[in-house]
Amino acid sequence: MNSYIEAVDFFKGNNPEKVAEEFKTPLYVYNEEIIRNRMHAVSQVITKYPYTANYSIKANTNIHLLKLALEEGLNCDAMSEGEIRMLEAAGFPKERIFFVPNNVSAEEMKYAIDRGIMTSLDSLSQLETFGEINPGGKCAVRINPGVGAGHHEKVVTAGKKTKFGVAEEDIDKIFEIAEKYNLTIAGINQHIGSLFMDYEPFLAAAQNFLRIALKFKNLEFVDFGGGYGIPYHKLDDEKPFEMEGFKKALEEILDKFVADYGYAPLFKSEPGRFCVAEGCVLLGRVHAVKQNNGHAYAGTDIGMNVLVRPSMYDSWHDVEVLRDGKAVSRDNLSPINVCGNICESGDLLAKDRMLPEIKKGDLACVLDAGAYGYSMCSTYNSRPRPAEVLVCKDGSIKTIRKRETYEDLFRLM
C-alpha cells in the first residue's frame, strides 16, 4: 500500500498540508467516522447473551472522544479518580462506569464508593481496604488467571510475573474477606495483555477464566478484559484482527459456560486501543535531514514527549511522508532514522525505516496514534503538549484540545 490515509480518505477531502499550517505541528488528527466504526464493532462482540463493551479510557481520555463512546452505547472503564471525573464530565452515569484501580488509596476508592460506582479490587489488601471503608458493600475482584499475552513484556498484564490481580490459589481468601465484611462479590474481571492479533490466546484465557468463574456463586457479571489488536504494519498490508471468527469461537465457549453455570451473567470486555488507535494520525514537520557516519536522519518535531510508545515499548508506527499535501510514492525506498527534537538518544520514532526520500519541510504522518499517544505525552524538555483536532463525518475540522502554551507550563508554579 502506498498511502493508508489516501486509501481511506482520512482527511475527508481536506489537504493535510493546509491542516498542518492552520493548526501547527506536532498535531494529533482524529477521524470521527473511523472511531465510531471501531466502537460499534466492539459493541457487537457478543450478541447472544447480555453484554457490554467497556471502553478502557486510559487509551485516550479526550472528553470529545468519550462523548462519542457514550453516543455509540459503550460503557467505560476508569483507572483513577481523574478518569472517573472525565467520564462524569462527558455525561456517563454511574451505572456505565466501572472503576478498575490498581494500588489506590482509601480516599480514592471512597470517591467511587460515594458515587455508587462499581469497583473492582486488584488485590486481597485492596479488598480488605474496601471492606473496612464500605462494609456490606458490593464489588468485583480482578483475578490473575496465570496466563498473559501482549506485544511487549510491559503490557502483559497477567501471568506469573505481573503486579495485577489476585492469584487463583488465593480465591478462598477472597471469600474469607467478603464474609468478614459482609461484601457481595458481584463480578470478576481479568486482563491478560494488550495488542494480540491472534485471538487463540485470548480464547484460551477466556475458557480458563470461565473455569475459575464457576467457583463464584451468583455472579452478576464476568469481564474478559480487552487487548484486541490493530494492524500497525498497514503499509505492508498487515491483516486486521479477525473479529468475525473471534466472535463465533467465543460464543461457543460461552454456550458451554452458561449451560454449566445455569444462567448467563452480563459479559463484558474492555477494549481500549481497538476503539481509537486507527482513528488518529500524528502530523509533524521535518526540520532537518542529515547523514551521521553513513546513517541518515530526519529530524522532526515529533519527540518522545509527543509520542512515547516507540521509545518505551519499541513500538512500530507506520510513517508516511507527505509533500504538498500528498503522500510521496513508496516506489524507491531507503533506510532512514526518523527522530524527534528531545535531548535523548532514544528519541527515535522509526529506526532504520525504509522510506521514500525525505526533504526538509515535508510532513511526517504517523499512523495509528490514537491509543496511548496524547494520553501518555508530556512536557519533557519544557515543550508544550500539542493540539488535537477532529475530522468530523461531514468533513469539517474542529479543535478538541487546544495547544498548550509556554504560559501553561508556568501556571502551577
Image (cartoon, rainbow, N blue to C red):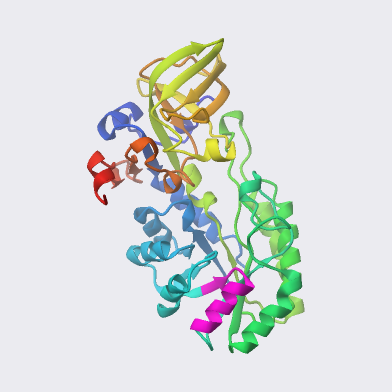
Residue drawn at x 77%, y 78% as measured from the top left: 260
Picture quadrant of residue 235: top right
Q: To which quarter of the image does residue 302 belong?
A: top left
Identify whether 400 is placed above or below 56. above
Nearer-the-camera pick, 145 or 93: 145
**Which residue is the extreme one toward the front?**
413
- Mark yes or no: residue 195 visible: no
Instruction: Give percent across and percent down for residue 228.
Output: 61, 51
Q: Nearer the viewer, residue 107 or 267?
A: 107
Q: Is residue 270 shown to the viewer in this render?
A: yes
* Residue 187 located left or right of residue 276: right
Judge from the rendering whether residue 226 lies leftward or rightward of residue 410; answer left or right.
right
Question: Residue at position x 61%, y 61% from top?
Answer: 225
Residue at the spot 59% in from the left edge and 84% down from the top edge = 184
Q: How many marks?
A: 0
Quadrant into which the N terminus falls:
top right
Residue 268's spot in the image, x, y percent? 58, 67
Task: Tell me, yes or no, whether the highlighted magenta stretch contains residue 120.
Answer: yes
Q: Position of residue 95 (x, y in %)?
A: 45, 75
User: What main secondary structure does the magenta stretch of the protein show?
Assistant: helix
| Lateral position of residue 61 relative to residue 52, left or right | left
Which residue: 34% across, 41% down? 385
Front-lying residue, 114 or 412: 412
In the image, residue 339 lies at what x, y percent? 47, 26
Give, as a single range, the part of the protein colored magenta: 119-133
Would residue 265 be counted in the magenta stretch? no
